[in-house]
């Protein structure tokens, strides 16, 4: 018997030893089924015959070795080990999270491999006359005499009943067909004519092939970043290399996938949470075998086991969606850089509004900076106009000045986009008699009124309930919507512009499978149209017919306790504005605000994002905030706020023994109560990354011994992007 050390999907920072039959060829990265208490778990073999194992008579045997070859190859194990160490998360949970669900459940991998059917020795020796009474069996037998038949071809041309009958007679058998790498094109696919800046960017990326290099592609909206990606990839495919393209959200996957499929005659697959479990496993296997040339996916595509990865592209690298906000809290951009280093391949980070961290690295020559300062087709960037809402009479939240310009664009047959980052009909219902507001009973937040589904929904915890008939405070039946969401804005616009088509794009309107593609197809139709949506509209979409963008409510994001809020607002304004004027018509952006003199708005309008970002970096340096210091966040949740405060106070006392750390807190989270739990946090800052991680390791060992740690929910977030 051999002792194997197994990483199990448990919230414990330790591994467990088991006995495995020495005749079974276990390797690191293989799955095993093992007993754990009164449960059976799927784990990953992490070490074979460790020197410090327990005595064999104290160990339980492995129930089953599920793989003969690793499902997590050596390079991927190194990446995941680094991730677990850097983010201080239990290794077993990190390893299992990298696998498709069917593999986590312990399914047999061979059941999902491509299959074909062939004749057995008895089938090949059979006389044709033996099947003369079974015509369909005879036809299938004759076809199998010529060649194997794949499973997909079988369903199209032959009867499965006939196949079963041949197999029952021992004349045919099923075989697994190993997937083979894709066929490389003989010549690179041709593309559009590049601008001088685009050509320089493509050349720089080509020169980085075959080695680890980080490149920041900073291009204004409409500058042709995707064309740079496509032409960079073209020559790589001729060398039979694979490419990973990570996009921040599912909403960007269809259009990105379509452009890559239209350009390249190679297998291009997608990966995101909207796929079925079998579709995700198929993509996993295609990447592993090299049958997939390009994978376009969301953040977890980072953990696919590529056969020969030659380039990683992170589109919209600034986007917060690239950071996992619960469980294993990794940042896909940062881990992708580590993977590129392990793979010895370049990584391209693309954005019109790069994060301050990436821009800081580029300005300090850690990244190669590739600017695209102009739009690819020569269009001018959209002009900004502030609409002062002070002392104005609004019609459905829109100023008369705004409505006049909307009418003008629609009359010319153009499209107008109205951006409002609040879905639902209204942020709350209000009692006209006493001012009572509908609140979530489990969160420190109001419930959003959804008129179409006739529900009040909390957008923080997901709780929903029927609309009340009367006020819970005074009993009045006079309840009216307070504020405006995209659902109400759409309804109001239908009254103002009854003859104009309206498309609403938010999480509610795109829930059903295929709904997003349908809505995007509608938007790409010519003719006057109003487009209403949330931040789903802001990222990467190409709407050539949009000439006017209206940001209905800028003020909601101007004031925040999160130091990243100005950066995120500037990125959002720039990205939304970038949807205007991408075709052959000039674009314009209207910003409705009560604070037109606000410094951030003036900087964005007068100087653009690039100027804002550099001044924001100077402020961060003066205040010693990231990226000039490293940040980690401990958060605690409990049904009693006092328990959170007590636990974090105890943690702060322990943290003060490390002179490299600066503490902020304990303080209540900006959203103090969520899903019935009070939330407090402690922020840790340090100029020395190594000292920070050494301190975190010591603190985590100490925390695990506290009895109070079992009475609360606590989490550690390294390099957090959201402090709310």
Image: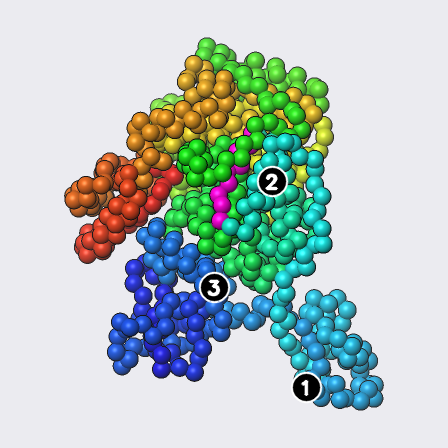
Q: Looking at the image, which residue sits at the far front?
A: 207
- Gap in angstroms between the C-alphas marked 1 and 3: 37 Å
Look at mark 3 in the image and give the residue it sits on: 73
Residue 161, image x, y percentages: 71, 76
Q: Which residue is mark 2?
A: 202
In the figure, residue 37 lies in which quadrant?
bottom left
Work out how far the residue at label 2 is from the one at label 3, CA to CA, in angstroms.
Answer: 31 Å
Foreground tag (2 vs 1)? 2
Compared with residue 90, is residue 509 higher up or lower down, i.e. above or below?
Answer: above
Hey, which quadrant is residue 159 in on the image?
bottom right
Viewed as shown, does residue 685 lie left or right of 103?
left
Q: Main secondary structure of the magenta part?
A: strand
Mark nearer the viewer, 1 or 3: 3
Does residue 166 appear in the picture of this structure? yes
Are dots 2 and 3 in contact, CB under 8 Å?
A: no
> Residue tagged by mark 1?
170
**In the image shown, does 383 or 522 lie closer to the viewer?**
383
**Does label 1 or label 3 sit earlier along the sequence?**
3
Task: Based on the picture, tell me whether residue 213 belongs to the magenta stretch.
Answer: yes
Q: Is residue 712 left or right of residue 209?
A: left
């Amino acid at each position: 018997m051999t002792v194997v050390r197994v990483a199990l999907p448990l919230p414990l920072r330790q591994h467990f030893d088991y006995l495995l039959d020495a005749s079974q060829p276990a390797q690191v990265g293989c799955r095993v089924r093992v007993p754990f208490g009164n449960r059976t778990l799927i784990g990953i073999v992490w070490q074979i015959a460790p020197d410090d194992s327990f005595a064999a008579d104290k160990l339980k045997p492995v129930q089953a070795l599920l793989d003969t070859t690793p499902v997590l190859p050596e390079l991927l194990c190194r990446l995941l080990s680094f991730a677990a160490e850097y983010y201080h998360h239990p290794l077993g949970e990190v390893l299992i999270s990298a696998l498709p669900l069917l593999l986590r459940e312990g399914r047999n991998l061979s059941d999902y491999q491509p299959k074909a059917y062939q004749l057995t020795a008895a089938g090949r020796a059979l006389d044709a006359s033996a099947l003369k009474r079974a015509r369909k069996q005879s036809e299938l037998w004759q076809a199998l005499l010529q060649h194997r038949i794949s499973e997909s071809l079988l369903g199209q041309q032959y009867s499965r009943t006939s196949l079963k009958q041949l197999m029952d007679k021992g004349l045919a058998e099923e075989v697994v067909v190993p997937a083979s790498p894709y066929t490389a094109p003989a010549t690179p696919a041709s593309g559009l004519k590049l601008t001088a800046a685009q050509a320089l960017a493509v050349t720089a990326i080509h020169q980085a092939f075959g080695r680890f290099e980080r490149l920041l592609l900073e291009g204004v909206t409409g500058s042709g970043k995707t064309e740079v990606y496509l032409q960079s990839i073209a020559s790589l495919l001729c060398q039979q290399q694979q490419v990973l393209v990570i996009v921040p959200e599912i909403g960007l996957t269809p259009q990105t996938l379509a452009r890559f499929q239209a350009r390249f005659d190679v297998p291009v697959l997608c990966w995101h949470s909207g796929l079925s479990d079998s579709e995700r496993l198929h993509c996993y296997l295609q990447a592993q075998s090299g049958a997939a040339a390009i994978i376009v996916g969301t953040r977890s595509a980072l953990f696919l086991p590529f056969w020969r990865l030659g380039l990683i592209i992170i589109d919209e690298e600034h986007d917060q969606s690239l950071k996992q906000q619960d469980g294993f809290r990794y940042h896909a951009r940062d881990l992708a850089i580590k993977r590129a280093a392990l793979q010895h391949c370049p990584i391209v980070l693309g954005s019109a509004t790069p994060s301050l961290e990436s821009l800081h690295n580029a300005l300090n020559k850690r990244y190669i900076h590739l600017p695209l300062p102009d739009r690819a087709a020569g269009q001018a960037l959209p002009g900004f106009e502030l609409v002062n809402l002070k002392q104005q009479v609004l019609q459905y939240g829109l100023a008369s000045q705004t409505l006049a310009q909307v009418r003008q664009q629609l009359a010319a047959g153009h499209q107008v986009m109205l951006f409002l980052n609040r879905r639902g009909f209204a942020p709350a219902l209000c009692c006209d008699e006493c001012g009572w507001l509908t609140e979530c009973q489990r969160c420190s937040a109001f419930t959003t009124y959804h008129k179409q589904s006739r529900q009040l929904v909390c957008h923080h915890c997901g709780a929903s309930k029927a609309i009340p008939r009367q006020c819970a405070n005074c009993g009045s039946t006079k309840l009216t919507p307070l504020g405006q969401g995209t659902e109400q804005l759409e309804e109001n616009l239908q009254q103002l512009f009854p003859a104009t088509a309206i498309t609403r794009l938010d999480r509610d309107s795109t829930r059903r499978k295929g709904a997003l593609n349908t809505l995007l197809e509608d938007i790409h139709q010519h003719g006057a149209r109003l487009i209403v949506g949330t931040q789903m509209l802001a990222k990467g979409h190409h709407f050539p017919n949009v000439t006017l963008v209206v940001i209905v409510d800028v003020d909601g994001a101007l004031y925040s306790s999160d130091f990243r809020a100005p950066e995120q607002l500037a990125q959002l304004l720039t990205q939304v504005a970038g949807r205007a004027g991408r075709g052959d018509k000039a674009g314009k952006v209207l910003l409705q605000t009560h604070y037109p003199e606000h410094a951030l708005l003036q900087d964005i309008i007068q100087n653009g994002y690039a100027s804002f970002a550099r001044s924001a970096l100077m402020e961060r340096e003066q205040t010693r905030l990231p990226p000039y210091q490293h940040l980690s966040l401990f958060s605690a949740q409990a049904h009693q706020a006092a328990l959170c405060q007590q636990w974090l106070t105890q943690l702060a006392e322990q943290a003060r023994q490390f002179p490299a750390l600066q503490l902020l807190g304990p303080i209540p989270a900006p959203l103090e109560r969520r899903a019935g739990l009070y939330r407090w946090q402690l922020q840790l800052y340090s100029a020395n990354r190594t000292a920070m991680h050494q301190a975190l390791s010591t603190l985590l060992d100490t925390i695990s011994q506290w009895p109070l740690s079992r009475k609360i929910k606590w989490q550690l977030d390294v390099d957090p992007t959201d402090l709310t």
